[in-house]
Each structure stands twice: as C-alpha cells, then as structure tokens.
Amino acid sequence: MELINVIEDRYSVRGFTNQEIEKEKLDAVLEAGRLAPTGVNFQPFKVYVIDTKENKEELTKIYSQPWFVEAPIVLAVVVDKTKSWTRPWDGKNIADIDGTIVMDHMILRATDLGLGTCYIAAFKKEEAIEFLDLDENEEPVLFTPLGYPNAKRSDRPRKPIDELVVYK
Ligand SMILES: Cc1cc2nc3c(=O)[nH]c(=O)nc-3n(C[C@H](O)[C@H](O)[C@H](O)COP(=O)(O)O)c2cc1C
C-alpha cells in the first residue's frame, strides 16, 4: 500500500475476531519496530509479544476494556530510561519518544498488512510492571492489541491544517 493510504486507513480498532495472526505478518510487524529510529541509535526498548489467551486475566487487570483481550496478541513497548539519551542541558530523557516511534512503526506496518491495532496509554502501570516483570529502570510506554478487526472506525475528525501548522 502507498504510505499515505496506510496512514489514512489506520484507525483505533476496538473489536477483534479471534483469528490467529500468520507468523510472517507478526514477524513483519516486529521488524518494522526493530527498524524504528531512536535517539543516538541507542535502541533502549524491548517489544513484548503477549499471548492473549494465556494471559487474559493479567491483561484485564492492566486494561479492563473487553476488546483489549479479543485479539490473539497484545504488544507492549517497554523502554529503559538508563539506556536512552538525555538532553544534557535540561535533563529531558527521550525514552518515551523512542518507544512511541517504535509502536507507531509497528502499528503502521500492521495496518499495511490488514491487521487492527489501538494505541493504549491508559493502562495501569504498576500492574503492567508486575506482569512483565520489569526492573526499576524499565517503563511500559504503550500497549496495543494486534488482530483482525471486527469493529468499524468511529468518526474522529481532525482539526483543519491551518489550526495545526504554524509557519514562522
Ligand atoms: C498515545 C496514544 C494513546 C492512546 N491511548 C488510548 C487508550 O488508552 N485507550 C483507547 O481506547 N484509545 C487510546 N488512544 C486512541 C485515540 O483515542 C485515537 O487515536 C484518537 O481518538 C483518534 O482516533 P483514530 O485512532 O481512530 O484515528 C490513544 C492514542 C494515542 C496516539
């Protein structure tokens, strides 16, 4: 698909069939994450591939919407803030930005392959840390279910370009 069509086709999928994901498609999604750029190329992230059926109870504690556990797989991007770049002059650590780009790459590739996703930031962090068995430097950034869509897109209009772009 043309990149612009992928961007236009992606929407937050909040309903999935239980159809399994072909291994080649999962691998292609993960490869897109691997290729994502990170600050100074530090690659301070891990992607967790979670089997929904095996972990339904734990996943529901992390994010309780029923559609979150409908797809066969949930992906989580986790960053290590001690391994990411920090802007020296004001202390801004960019781990979250790195992790978000990784998730965005995977989500756009998934869309390209006909799979549905939904960025999830409204998860319970402590429950996620416990389930993923993270150490104190690691932080979950985003989750997404990954599966075949079983829900239509809802109308989410975007602001007009002149409200969003500032030329100076
Ligand atoms: C960083 C980020 C976090 C989000 N977190 C959630 C979430 O926790 N739960 C949810 O249902 N949707 C979440 N969304 C989805 C947004 O609500 C959605 O992208 C937005 O309404 C635009 O709709 P669209 O994705 O269908 O274009 C998130 C989106 C982004 C980009």
Image: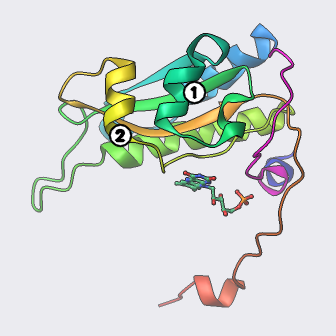
Q: Which residues are magenta?
A: 7-21
Question: Residue 165 colored magenta?
Answer: no
Q: Residue shown at 74%/27% (left/top)?
A: 71
The percent position of residue 96, horizontal first and vertical second, equals 36, 46
Farthest residue to the left: give it: 89
| 142 over 54 or under it: above or below | below
Q: Secondary structure at mark 1?
A: strand
At label 1, which amino acid type do we have? Leu
Question: Residue 11 colored magenta?
Answer: yes
- Location of residue 108 by image quarter: top right
The percent position of residue 46, horizontal first and vertical second, equals 41, 23
Task: Specify few, some or many for label 1: CA neighbours under 10 Å numbering under 14, 14-19, or 20 or more.
Answer: many
Mark with earlier residue (1, 2): 1
Q: Quadrant of the N terminus?
A: top right
The percent position of residue 4, horizontal first and vertical second, equals 81, 54
For disc 1, the marked residue is 75
Residue 8 horizontal side relative to residue 61, left or right = right
Q: Residue shown at 53%/40% (left/top)?
A: 63
The Cα atoms of the two marked residues, 1 and 2, are separated by 15 Å
Residue 61 horizontal side relative to residue 6, left or right = left
Whether residue 35 is visible, yes or no, is: no
Identify the disc placed on residue 125: 2
At label 2, which amino acid type do we have? Lys
Q: Residue shown at 17%/28% (left/top)?
A: 136
Q: Residue shown at 19%/30% (left/top)?
A: 137
Q: Ligand 1 is in which quadrant of the figure? A: bottom right
| 118 over 112 or under it: above or below | below
| 57 over 3 or under it: above or below | above
The mark closer to the camera, 1 or 2, is 2
Task: Specify few, some or many for label 2: CA neighbours under 10 Å numbering under 14, 14-19, or 20 or more.
Answer: some
